[in-house]
């Protein structure tokens, strides 16, 4: 199961016809004008949290995969607390989805607790 299907909760099977091939010449790869970026991070240790914090302080969104951390390890709690503090400091938001993902946002970005098209 891919990261995006985990995020979106997609358990539906997909076929090749569900996807469209994109020609890179048709898509702008210049992100210099973008005010915000979305980063994907894999957290395996305390040191990985530093890059996440820097990105959030810079005004970017981070989707962090924490599956490499053991859930019973106190390191997980320490990293989650540290990232929660960063989200509070910048007036952003943080959500933990299950035992394997976290989304941390900067100032002015709120994470909805409802899935689109569904009322939880």
Image: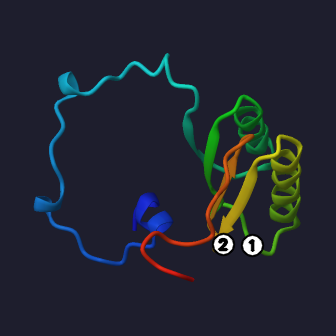
Seen as rendered, the residue at the extreme bottom is 120
Answer above or below: position of 58 versus 113.
above
Which residue position is annotated with label 2?
A: 99
Mark nearest the camera among 1 and 2 is 2
The residue located at (76%, 32%) in the rendering is 54
Q: Nearer the viewer, residue 112 or 27?
A: 112
Total number of numbered discs in the rendering: 2
Answer above or below: position of 66 versus 46.
below
Write down the quadrant of residue 102 in the picture.
bottom right
Write down the quadrant of residue 14 in the picture.
bottom left
Q: In this rendering, would 14 be left or right of 63?
A: left
Q: Mark 1 and mark 2: span between their CA atoms?
A: 7 Å
Q: Are marks 1 and 2 in contact (CB under 8 Å)?
A: yes
The residue located at (18%, 54%) in the rendering is 19
- Measured as percent of width and height from the top left, residue 88 is found at 86, 50
Q: Nearer the viewer, residue 114 or 7?
A: 114
- Measured as percent of width and height from the top left, residue 68 is found at 64, 60
The residue located at (19%, 22%) in the rendering is 25
Which residue position is annotated with label 1?
A: 71
């Amino acid at each position: 199961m891919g990261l995006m299907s985990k995020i979106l909760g997609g358990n539906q099977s997909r076929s090749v016809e569900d996807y469209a091939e994109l020609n890179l010449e048709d898509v702008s790869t210049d992100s210099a004008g973008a005010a915000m970026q979305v980063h994907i991070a894999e957290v395996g240790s305390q040191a990985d949290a530093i890059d996440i914090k820097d990105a959030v302080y810079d005004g970017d969104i981070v989707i962090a995969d924490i599956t490499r951390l053991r859930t019973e390890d106190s390191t997980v709690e320490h990293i989650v607390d540290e990232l929660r503090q960063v989200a509070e400091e910048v007036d952003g938001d943080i959500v933990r989805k299950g035992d394997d993902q976290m989304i941390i946002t900067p100032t002015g970005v709120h994470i909805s607790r409802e899935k689109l098209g569904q009322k939880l």
